Amino acid sequence: IVTVTVDGRQVQVPGNATILDACRKAGQNVPTLCYLKGINEIGSCRVCVVEVEGVDQLVASCNNYVLDGMRIKTNSPKVRLARRENVMLLLAQHDTTCTTCARGGNCKLAEVSNDLGIIDFPYKTILANSPWPHDFPLIRNNDKCIRCMRCIQICDKVQASHVWGITNRATHTLVDVAGGANIHDVDCTLCGQCITHCPTGALRERDDVMRVYDALADPDVTTIVQIAPSVRTSWAEHWGLSDEKATIQHMVAALRPMGFDYIVNTDFSADLTIMEEGTELLEHMRRNANGGSGFPMFTSCCPGWVRFVKAHYPELVDDVSTSKSPQQMFGAVVKSYYAEMLGIDPHKIFSLSIMPCVAKKAECAYPNMNDACGDPDVDCVLTVREVSRMLRADHVDVANLEPEPFDEPLGYGTGAGIIFGATGGVMEAALRTAYHIVTGKVPKDDMFDEVRGLRGWKEATFDMDGTKVRVAVASGLQNAKDLCDAIVSGEVSYDFVEVMACPGGCVGGGGQPIHDGEELAGPRGKVLYGLDRVAKYRNSYENPDIVRCYKEYFGEPLSERAEKLLHTDQHG
Ligand code: HC1
Ligand code: SF4
């Protein structure tokens, strides 16, 4: 413990605290821009500079440490001048078209600049003008990049993907695809973590909103929209409503007036995924017992993970579940069973999904995701941020909605489907149903809750009437890499492994609303587990809509029809 003085106020902090920590402890909110705790502590933007008595130069407070007796000034004339100058130099290379920016109203650079009162701007702006393929689901606009390095760090340290790097030198320095490559040619998983950790509008998803407006305007098209499990936790964050005022039923009510013909629930197809994947797991375990690959079966619902495993662990691809993701299962069901039920031509359906995810935009466009009628099973994916923009454009009075139910019969999902959105949720959901298949018994409440929580690599072994199931769960791709390395080298061995690319799972997804510097996967995940606890049905096999769907259409899991519509070759 050391004692330092901040703007005349003495505080005690641990000897390894940064100056920034000490200032915050003293109640002085020093502004930061490039800083991301634990991930990017490089002091490059020089916005957090402070004056330390006896030191000639100003020091960055985020990555310099306290010394006993240190006297710090956070707002001296020298500090004020330097902060303004540093931000103005950033603005001199920034395209300040804030009126047409995806981050309008939610931009850290604008906040810092406005807070500093930068109004008369003396410099001429020079922009990077670097090209980008706008068909790619992730868009980089270097005219808005402030070279804070956050995207490089999150991609390297947390996601083990190394997509971004520094190109050019001196005043021409850019953050861009590493080595100057084309984004199409590198192993970007599309997890979108660079977007949610970018302080400006330099990174965003491809905006597909106009395609949805076009479909809504076409009288010959039936629009069917599915909503992913984790979206219920975050869709109204822009409005800052309480969980009770922003349920999924409120979201259904918000979407209805836009003109969607059917609003359905991805939780339903999460349950369907579990029926297929749980059955597939037991087959995989039987194969391994009879000389199979020896590798565990891996989940397949996260397209970020699937892109990662294909790029880095080709030897494991055969062990990735062939079950499509809930999004894609829903699309295939919508353009087959549902179309038949409604008596409409599947070619005239526009199948939209609302996801916390950027990689889902790529997943729906894969050429092997068109099994129902030859057209893509899912036509378009919007992130939560895009939907939030649509609701704002329509001036929906989000705070005063009356909850409305999903459309039946594909509107119901169990607690197991709901928890898909959090790390460990797919695993827990699958174990509940696998337990029922193996033992014929109803799983006890929360008997698989060891796989919950935000730890990056979790493991457990469960006994199902004598059948031991060894499982592991990873979220965040660096954790997935560590896990895969250990599996490939034979250091560890499991039967079933869940991987979600985003830290914390889809609740921490790259398409979620952005709150700079805040990680919300934990609290959003808690909402999902709370909903599971009070759900009428908590096991996928109990979902009445699932029972009906198998009875009327699929027969049983892994039937010929199920294989055709609900499974895919992961090599595709
Ligand atoms: Fe997810 Fe999934 S949980 S992948 O995070 O398996 O995106 O929410 O919809 O498909 O169900 C995402 C979330 C989502 C799928 C499901
Ligand atoms: Fe998308 Fe969820 Fe995977 Fe992230 S964890 S890439 S949000 S599916």
Image (cartoon, rainbow, N blue to C red):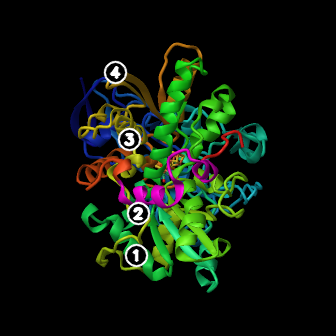
**Mark 1, secondary structure of its residue:** helix
Which residue is denoted by mark 3 in the rendering?
433
Q: Which is more N-terminal, label 2 or label 4? A: 2
As measured in the structure, the alpha-carbon distance from the residue carrying label 3 to the one carrying label 4 is: 16 Å
Q: Is residue 562 magenta?
A: yes
**Mark 3, secondary structure of its residue:** helix
- Under mark 1, the amino acid is Ala
Contact between labelled residues 2 and 3, with CB atoms less than 8 Å apart:
no
Of circles 4 and 1, the one toward us is 4
Which residue occupies 57% across, 37% down? 321
Of circles 3 and 1, the one toward us is 3
Mark 4 residue's CB less than 8 Å from ligand 1: no
The mark found on residue 466 in the picture is 4
The mark found on residue 235 in the picture is 2
Q: Which span is picked out in magenta?
A: 543-565
The mark found on residue 254 in the picture is 1
**Mark 2, secondary structure of its residue:** loop
Residue 304 position (above or below residue 516):
above
- Under mark 2, the amino acid is Trp
